[in-house]
Image (cartoon, rainbow, N blue to C red):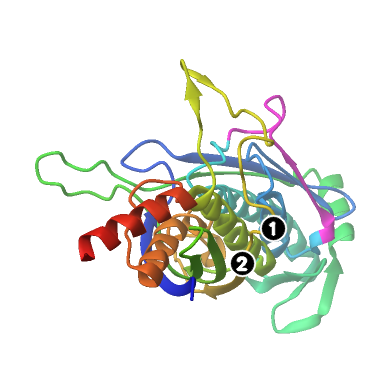
Amino acid sequence: MSKKRGIGMACFFYGTGYGNGFPDVSTATVEIHDDGTATVRTGAVDCGQGSSTVLAQIAAEELGVPYEWVTVITADTDTTPDAGTTAATRQTYASGNAVQMACREAREVLFEYTRTILGVNTIAGLVAREGIIYVKGYPKKQITYPEAAARARLAGCRLVGQGTFVTHTTAVDRETGQGAPYWPYAFGTQIAEVEVDTETGQVRVLRFIAAHDVGRAVNRKGVEGQIEGGIAQGLGMALLEKVHLQHGRIVNNSFSTYLIPTTLDMPEVQPLIVETYEPTGPYGAKGVGEPATIPTVPAIINAIYNAVGVRITELPVTPEKILAALREKEGEQK
């Protein structure tokens, strides 16, 4: 039988953010309008990973308004504060914290005015849910967000908040090796099942099980999409993608010559979201961007070894490399 199957596993830990004491700062602002809606401004670029959705969810939760009432304006260097790069799996954690801090500041201004209307001594006696502000323990005593916001502004209150979050890391001491270069860390395990054709060298990835510790999943569909997208990228790195240079120039500089996985190449992916509350993250969340790609390649390489007993050490794993390794192995056995 020319086709053999194997299973491989890879585990990882990954430090999010810039790390090693390098300044990792995100800033956000929020304004609550007269109609109860809110506008969040942040430099965090959403390039498809869904950060704008997550930041809107965090703002809605912190303010106590429906998600649909929140508008997120991002990546405008003229009107939005710097939130650092969309890199290092940091935006949910760093900018999420900044948005939460900004919303908390604006909400406290609104609550400070509203408590006098509802007759409570401190803002700790108020709760906001789904656009309604009410007295804790006595929900019937309430006021709508639009009414409270409009009255507060007419009374001279400015319902604006700003939050700046700095990730707490320290550089590693070169002599002792001690320090806290990253925080927080992401953890995970991926298991791959592959099928290797020993006659052609072709590798098909059949299935992936991917368990990732994400702190707390603010948006479960978004987390699952990140995991699936990370595996797609790792699959390309493992089996297809290679930059070919000729006299310093890239010769396969288009998608007709630079191979990436298509939907037909994708295996069945089973994401397993592991939630372990991260106390320094917004609502316990941390990132899952790059961590979704890190273990994919070694899991595939280990599965190939499990299937046919050859260890490939250069990427991508092409059919030619598989066949050459099998021939070398056969020659050694003879």
Kindly report which numbered mark, 2 or 1, lies closer to the viewer in this rendering. 2
Above or below, comparing residue 286 to residue 8 in the picture: above
Above or below, comparing residue 121 to residue 185 in the picture: below
- Disc nearer the start of the sequence (2/1): 1
* Residue bearing mark 1: 112
78 drawn magenta: yes
Task: Decide: few, some or many residues near mark 1? Use Cα within 10 Å; few <14, some 14-19, many ≥20.
Answer: some
Q: CA distance from mark 2 to mark 1?
A: 54 Å
Looking at the image, the residue that sits furthest to the top is: 247
Q: Which residue is painted at 63% across and 66% down in the image?
A: 224
Secondary structure at numbered mark 2: loop
Occupied quadrant, residue 108: bottom right
Secondary structure at numbered mark 1: helix
Please say whether residue 15 is visible from this viewpoint.
Answer: no
Residue 258 x/y as whole percent: 61, 37
Which amino acid lies under the numbered mark 2 shown in the image of this protein? Pro
Report if the CB atoms under discs 2 and 1 are less than 8 Å apart: no
Q: Which residue is painted at 67% across and 26% down in the image?
A: 77
Which amino acid lies under the numbered mark 1 shown in the image of this protein? Glu
Residue 113 x/y as whole percent: 74, 57
Quadrant placement of the C terminus: bottom left
Q: Which residue is painted at 41% across and 55% down in the image?
A: 323
| Relative to 125, 129 lies left or right | right
Occupied quadrant, residue 111: bottom right
Residue 26 x/y as whole percent: 54, 41
Residue 288 x/y as whole percent: 52, 58
The residues colored magenta run: 68-82
| Relative to 90, 65 lies left or right | right
Q: What's the mark number on residue 267?
A: 2
Please say whether residue 74 is visible from this viewpoint.
Answer: yes
